[in-house]
Image: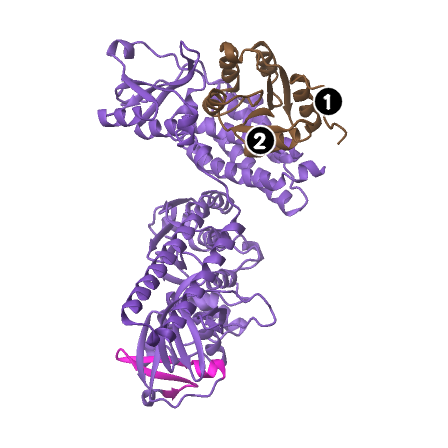
Chain colours: A purple, B brown
Amino acid sequence: MTDFLEGFLDDYFAECDEHLTTIRRGLLALEGSVGRQRPDPVVTEELFRAFHSIKGIAGMVEHRESEQLSHEMESYLRAIREGDARLTTPGIEALIEGARSLEHAIAARRQGDTPPDTSRAVTLLRGLLSESTPAGTVHDTAPAGATPSAQWQCVFTPSPALVSRGVTVDLIRTRLRESGEIINASPIIAADGSVAFRFIFAGALDQATVDAWAADGMTCTALQSDDTDKPIAPSPDLVQAAPGATLSTGHYVRVDLARLDELMRMIGDLVILRVRLTDSITRVEPFVPPADRRVIQEHLIAVERQLRDLREGVMRVRLVRVGEIFRRMPFVVRDLARDTGRKVRVVLTGQDTEIDKFLVERMMDPVLHLVRNAVSHGIESLDERIAAGKPPEGTISLSASASGDIVTLEIADDGCGVDTERILARAAQVGLPVPPNPDEAVLLDLISSPGFSTRDDSDRASGRGFGMAIVRTTVQELGGTIRMTSTPGQGTRFSIDLPLTLAITDALIARVGTHTFAMPQTSVREVIEVDAAAVRAIEGGEVTPYRGGALPVVRLSRILNVPVSAMDRLHAFIVGTGAATTGLLVDRILGQREIVVRSIADPLIRVDGVSGATDLGDGRAVLILDAAAIVRRARVRGTGALPAVKEIA
Amino acid sequence: MTRVLIVDDSPTIRRMVKVSLGLLPAPTDFIEAASGLEAIERLAIGPVDLIVLDLNMPDLHGLEVLGFVRSHERYRSLPVIVLTTRGDDSSRQAALQGGASAYLTKPFTPAVLAAEVSRLLGSTASPGAAK
C-alpha cells in the first residue's frame, strides 16, 4: 500500500463505522418487508447508498474483501430497487451474513489481522441474483390511508450573504423536511440567469412561517388544486428526498475523541485552579474590606457556575445515543437463537438515552456478553418453554434510562432464572467461600469470580473467553455498579448503573487518621453516624446496629493501614446492595466536592481498591477509593465471608 | 488561484481528491459539496474553475447536476470531471453524452486525476506525476 493510501485508512474506518450503523439499522427495518412487492424504498435506497459508498472508498484504499462484499450487496439491492428482484427470506439472510462478513473484514483490516474468509457470503449473495425472479412491473402505489396534505412551491435563491448566515440549501431542505414531505427538489435558472432551487412540498405551513422564511430568501406559494391535480412527474431519485432518508452532512463535524479528552482535561485543570483560588481568597479575606469581599465572593460563585456550565457543555458533546450499543444486539441474538434452536425476540427501549462515547465503547463487550448469556443460559429451549406454559418465543429486553448523572442499562430475559444450586455446587468445586442462604448479590459475586464457569466447552457460545468477571471489572473500572435480580422460572435481570461521564464527578471527602481520601458519590447509598462502642466483632468481622439489624462494617483504617482512630463517634458510608451491603468506617466527613478524576496508569502503583487520584486544590494528591473493590478485599481477608445483614437481623 | 469544486458525499473521497490535486503545480482552492443541491449552490454563489463530480449522491444525481450545469449559459463550458465508482458501464455513456469533460472511475490514481485536471485547465506545466 502506498503512503498516499495509508494516510486515508483512518478516514476509511471512520466512514465505514457510520455506514455500518446505517446498514444494521436498515437491514433490521428491511426484514419486516420480506415478500412484499417492493420493500420500503427509503430503506432500500439508504442501504444501497451505504454499500455503494463503502465500495467506493474500499476500492480506493485497496481493501478487496470489503469492496467485493459491498459490491455484491449493492447489486442485489439495486435489483430490488429496480424491481428486477424480490426481497426473499434467503435474500435478507444473505444480506445479514454479508453485512457481518463486511464488518469482520473491516475490523480485521483495522487491527491488522488476517482477512476473514468472505467467500461464503459472496457466494450466497451471487446466488441470489442468478435465481431471483423479477418482482413484476406493478409499481407500489402510495400507502393506503395517506391523506394528501396541501402542496406548496417553495423557491430558494441562495446568495453569499445568506450562506455566510448559515442559510444554505441544506438548511432549507432540513426545514422543509421537518414541516412535511419534499416531493421534488430541482435547481432552476431565473430569467436573469441566477440560480435558484424549487421545492415542491406537501405539508402544513402557516403564514408566520412563510413570512419568516421569506427573510431567508425563500418564497412559498400554495399550489392551487388545479396544480395538485396535475401529477408532478417525480424523478427517479425522489425517494432519496423523502424525510429522514439521509442526514445532511452540513450541520455535523466529526471530532477526534482525543481532542475532547484534551478539552475535558483542561476543564479539569480549571476546576482545580478554581478550588485553589477559593482557598487563597479565604486566607486573605480578613485583610479585605467587607464591601470588596462581597464582590469577590460573587465573582467566585459566578466563575464556579460558569465552569460547571462549560463542563456540562463539553460533556454533552461527548454524549452519543445508547442505541449504538444496542443496535448490534438483535443480530447477535438472531444468530445465537438460530444456532441453539431457540426463538428469541429482542425489545429495545430508551435507545435515545445519551451516554459518554468512551463508556459506549467500553460497555459494548460487557453488554454483548450479558445478551449472549441471556440467550444461551437464560431462555429455555422451545420444548421447555412450551412445557412450562410460557410463550414459545423468549424475550430479551434491553433498556436504557438516565436519572441525574447516572445512566442505567438493563439486560433482562424471561427465561428460567439463575440456577442457584448449580452455582453453589460450582463455587464449592472451585473453592469459593459460600455464605449460608446466599442472595442474588452473593450469587452475582460468585459468577463474577475469575475462573467461574458452569458450562462445559460444548456450550461456550456465551463465553468466548470473556466471562462475568470481565463484565464486573469493566463496570467497576468505569465507576459503575452492577446488580442482578432473578426469579426461578421467570427470568433474570442485570442492571448496570454508570456515571454519565468520567473525568469529573461529585465525591464525598473523608478523613481516616491523618489521611484524606475521596469516595465517588455514585457508589455511596447513605451516610450514617456510628457509635464506636456499638461496633462489635463477630465471626471474624465487625458489625454495627443498622435499621433494626446488623450491618457488616469495614474499618478503612485497616484497609489503608493507618492507625485505628480513638474517636467515639465515627461515620460509615453505606455501599453495595443486598447481602453485600457494607458500611465503610471513617473518622470524619469533610464535605462534598466536585473532583477531577486522574487515573493511575502505572501498573506498579495500581492497587485494588483505589480507582484514581485527585487534587483537592492544595496541590496534594488524594486517593479516590473504589468501594466495591474494598468490600471484596475485606471479604477475602476475613475468615470466610462476612455475615450478611439478613441472617443477623 | 484555481478553484476546484469537489462534489462527493464521502468526506474520505473528497479528501483524497484534495490530496491528489495537491500534486498540481498551480495553487488550488478547494470548495466542497456533499450533495447535488449543495454543489449547485456552491456554483451559484462563487466562481468555480472546474468540478470533480460523483454520480451517485443523495438528492440530486450527478447526471442531473451535470445536466443543469450544461443547461446554464454561464457554466456551459465549465470543465466537469465525472469521478464515479466503477462497475456501472452505462453511466460512462450517459455522462459523456450529458457533457462530461472526462470520466474517471474510483479507485482512481492520484496522478491520473491531477493530469486530467491539468489538461482541462489548459495548464502547460505538467503535474507532478512522478509520484
Residue type pointed to by label 2: Arg
Q: Is residue A497 magenta?
A: no
Placement of the C terminus of chain A among the 4 image quadrants: bottom left
- Magenta-colored span: A536-561
Q: For residue A392, which quarter of the picture? A: top left
Dots 1 and 2: beta carbons under 8 Å?
A: no
Residue A455 position within the rendered picture, expressed as x and y whole percent measured from the top left: 52, 60
Disc 1 on helix, strand or loop? loop
Q: Is residue A435 above or below residue B73?
A: below
Main SS class of the magenta portion in the image:
strand
Question: Residue furthest toward the right?
Answer: B130
Task: Evaluate whether residue A124 shows in this view.
Answer: no
Label 1 to label 2, Cα distance in Å? Answer: 24 Å
Q: Is residue A543 magenta?
A: yes
Q: Is residue A219 above or below residue A331?
A: above
Viewer-side residue, B130 vs A176? B130
Q: Which residue is mark 1?
A: B125
Q: Which residue is mark 2?
A: B14
Q: Chain of mark 1?
A: B
- For residue B27, side relative to residue A461 (left or right): right
Residue type pointed to by label 1: Ala
Disc 2 on helix, strand or loop? helix
- For residue A415, side relative to residue A365 (left or right): left
Residue at the (54%, 11%) spot, across then down: B76
Q: Is residue A157 above or below residue A51?
A: above
Residue at the (52%, 19%) spot, across then down: B62
Residue A405 position within the rendered picture, expressed as x and y whole percent measured from the top left: 36, 58
